[in-house]
Image (cartoon, rainbow, N blue to C red):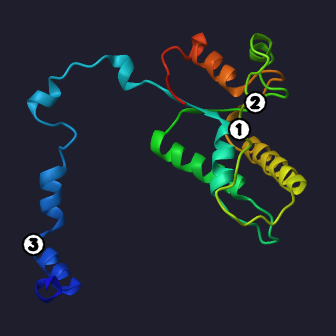
Amino acid sequence: FLKDIWPSNKEIENTLSNSLNAEMFINRYSNISKGPSQWQNIKTKERFKMQKRMLIIDQLNLFFRCYIVNPALSLNGQPIGGLMGVVKSLQKICRETKPDKIVICWDGEGGSKKRKLMDKNYKAGRNPIRLNRDVRNLTESEERQNKLWQMQRLVEYFNCMPLAQLIYSGIEADDIIAQITHMPQYKDWQKVI
């Protein structure tokens, strides 16, 4: 069995401490960013090195994704999965993408008036969202109120953060996102949506 031949943690620690030291590490990796001559000869565009990055979020979409999968409850038993999931997701996305600017886009009241004029059945066939769990501790009306409360809390939290929130009556987040990506002042920015 492997456990019979596998070294103990103490044996591994002793081997590493006897084999490695700080001087070896410094000698080997002190010039790692310079790389070999082939690496140094790669031509890049200067604008690429300094390109700024903008994170753009369709907030209602993110909220519902988090809400349906996260069963978290507050200390008083109220669902907070959407709220908690969005904050954790935003943390993770920011850690991974390191944006210079964050824009949160909300669907405006009434959704897309333009799209509804073009197609009166726009989004008419969509099923209501379903929780991915069997436990329900709220009535349908209480659940609707809870979702609104969680979204209001998100707006309040976001107002305390270094980001921009956009919402326009009669306009969906998708349309706001499309507009932002075509704004001349962000032409050279990388957009993460």
Residue 30 in picture, x, y percent from top left = 19, 49
**Precedes in sequence: disc 1 or disc 3:** 3
Q: Which one is in front, 2 or 89?
A: 2
* Above-or-below relation of 35 to 83: above
Q: Which one is in front, 177 or 140?
A: 140
Residue 152 in picture, x, y percent from top left = 82, 46
Instruction: Tell me the tag on residue 19.
Output: 3
- Amino acid, disc 3: Ser
Residue corresponding to mark 1: 60
Q: How far apart in space, not on screen, are marks 3 and 2 (Cα)? A: 59 Å
Q: Which residue is drawn at 59% across and 46% down?
A: 90
Residue 26 sits in quarter = bottom left
Could you tell me which secondary element the residue under label 1 belongs to?
helix
Q: Residue at the front extreme?
A: 125
Circle nearer the viewer, 3 or 2: 2
Could you tell me which secondary element the residue under label 2 belongs to?
loop
> Contact (CB < 8 A) between labels 2 and 1?
yes
Residue 145 in picture, x, y percent from top left = 88, 51
Number of marks present in the image shown:
3
**Precedes in sequence: disc 3 or disc 2:** 3
Q: What is the quadrant of the C terminus in the image?
A: top right
- Amino acid, disc 2: Asp
Instruction: Tell me the tag on residue 107.
Output: 2
- Amino acid, disc 1: Leu
